[in-house]
Image (spheres, helix red, strand yellow):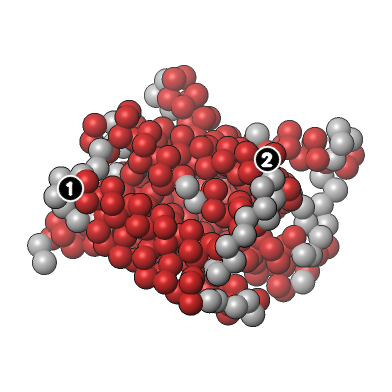
């Protein structure tokens, strides 16, 4: 294997590791929700703590080269952090989780469509498109896990789709900074704006009462299970996850990298089986096989 192919393999491994972090995050979030935290409180705290860690690691450069770049990173922060998590978590309170998972995980398809329109370098060959579609079918089977009944919830489903669109926008917008800023700088900026724009969400959740805005159950962090899962969300899903993903987007391209997102439900269901005792069906196993097969096909030489 040549050095170039070794490097490509390394980025694929990093993409898989990132998806593993994100796949387990749903279980960690569920644990925190069961211990008195609201969804808005969870993502606001994880954004704020992640930003402070990144600030401690990188604090020599604060401003972008110009205000246009600053605005674009602001867009990345609110689409890839604040709006994505707000829409997804609100959708979960209005729609069945199977609906939300299925709709949110369509974002690689949206990324493939938008990326092909906006960037010539992101256009895929026929075999890669087929591979992406096979992976999508596999993701559907894993999410449904043998339950082929979807209950429509227009508002919740629309919010889930909004979440998917937000992630696609972030993925495509952030790619233009390849070679302009370091991954550390980009990620730190994203979490700064993500945390900043989460504060209004906290305020509205508290009914506009400033005194209740930060009424967070801090005492629950004394419980080891709460502290452990919050660290998992902050360090692995947010800090390492976004740093790795922004690097993967640079190296593999937005469309092909996004194809790995289809595997998130697979990681989630495996984690749920281990940690929560949930059941996995033959249908989900078939979906897992389809996800892997589709990914392999999608990574084949472009234009083949």
Q: Residues within 10 Å of mark 2 (few under 14, many from 20)?
A: few
Q: Which residue is mark 1?
A: 302
Q: Is residue 141 left or right of residue 277?
A: left
Judge whether residue 240 can be spotted in this image: no
Q: Which mark is residue 154?
A: 2
The percent position of residue 175, horizontal first and vertical second, equals 35, 36
Residue 157 position (above or below residue 217): above
In this view, which residue lies farthest toward the top? 67
| Viewer-side residue, 87 vs 180 | 87
- In the picture provided, is 48 more to the left or to the right than 77? right
164 is higher (above) or lower (below) than 50 = above
Tell me: residue 77, above or below residue 41.
above
**Residue most toward the left?**
2
Q: Which residue is nearer to you in this view: 280 or 187?
A: 280
Foreground mark, 1 or 2, reads 2
Can residue 222 be seen from the camera position used here? yes
Residue at image coords 64%, 80%: 277
Q: Position of residue 150 (x, y in %)?
A: 62, 55
Residue for point 53% across, 76% down? 281
Give the CA separation, mark 1 to mark 2: 38 Å
User: Within 10 angstroms of label 1, few (less than 14), some, or many (20 or more) residues?
Assistant: few
Of helix, strand and loop, which one carries label 2?
helix
- The answer to whether the residues at label 1 and label 2 have Cβ atoms under 8 Å apart is no
Q: Nearer the viewer, residue 112 or 78?
A: 112
Image location (x, y in percent) of residue 304: 14, 50
Q: Secondary structure at mark 1?
A: loop
Residue 156 vs residue 195, the one in the foreground: 156
């Amino acid at each position: 294997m040549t050095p170039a192919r070794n490097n490509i393999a390394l980025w694929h491994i990093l993409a898989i590791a990132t998806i593993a972090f994100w796949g387990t995050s749903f279980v960690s979030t569920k644990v925190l929700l069961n211990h008195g935290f609201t969804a808005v409180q969870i993502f606001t705290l994880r954004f704020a703590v992640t930003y402070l860690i990144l600030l401690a690691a990188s604090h020599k450069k604060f401003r972008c080269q110009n205000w246009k770049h600053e605005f674009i990173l602001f867009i990345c922060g609110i689409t890839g952090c604040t709006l994505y998590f707000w829409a997804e978590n609100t959708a979960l309170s209005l729609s069945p989780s199977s609906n939300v998972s299925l709709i949110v995980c369509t974002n690689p398809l949206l990324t493939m469509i938008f990326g092909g329109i906006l960037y010539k370098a992101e256009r895929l060959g026929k075999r890669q498109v087929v591979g992406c579609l096979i992976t999508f079918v596999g993701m559907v089977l894993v999410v449904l896990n043998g339950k082929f009944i979807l209950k429509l919830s227009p508002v919740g489903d629309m919010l889930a789709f909004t979440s998917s669109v937000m992630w696609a926008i972030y993925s495509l917008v952030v790619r233009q900074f390849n070679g302009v800023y370091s991954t550390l700088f980009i990620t730190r900026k994203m979490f700064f704006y993500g945390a900043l724009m989460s504060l209004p969400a906290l305020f509205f959740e508290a009914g506009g009462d400033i005194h209740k805005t930060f009424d967070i159950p801090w005492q629950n962090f004394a419980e080891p299970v709460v502290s452990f899962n919050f660290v998992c969300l902050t360090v692995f899903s947010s800090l390492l996850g976004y740093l790795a993903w922004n690097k993967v987007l640079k190296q593999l391209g937005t469309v092909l990298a996004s194809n790995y997102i289809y595997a998130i439900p697979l990681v989630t269901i495996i984690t749920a089986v281990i940690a929560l005792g949930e059941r996995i069906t033959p249908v989900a196993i078939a979906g897992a096989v389809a996800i892997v097969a589709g990914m392999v096909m999608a990574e084949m030489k472009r234009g083949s």
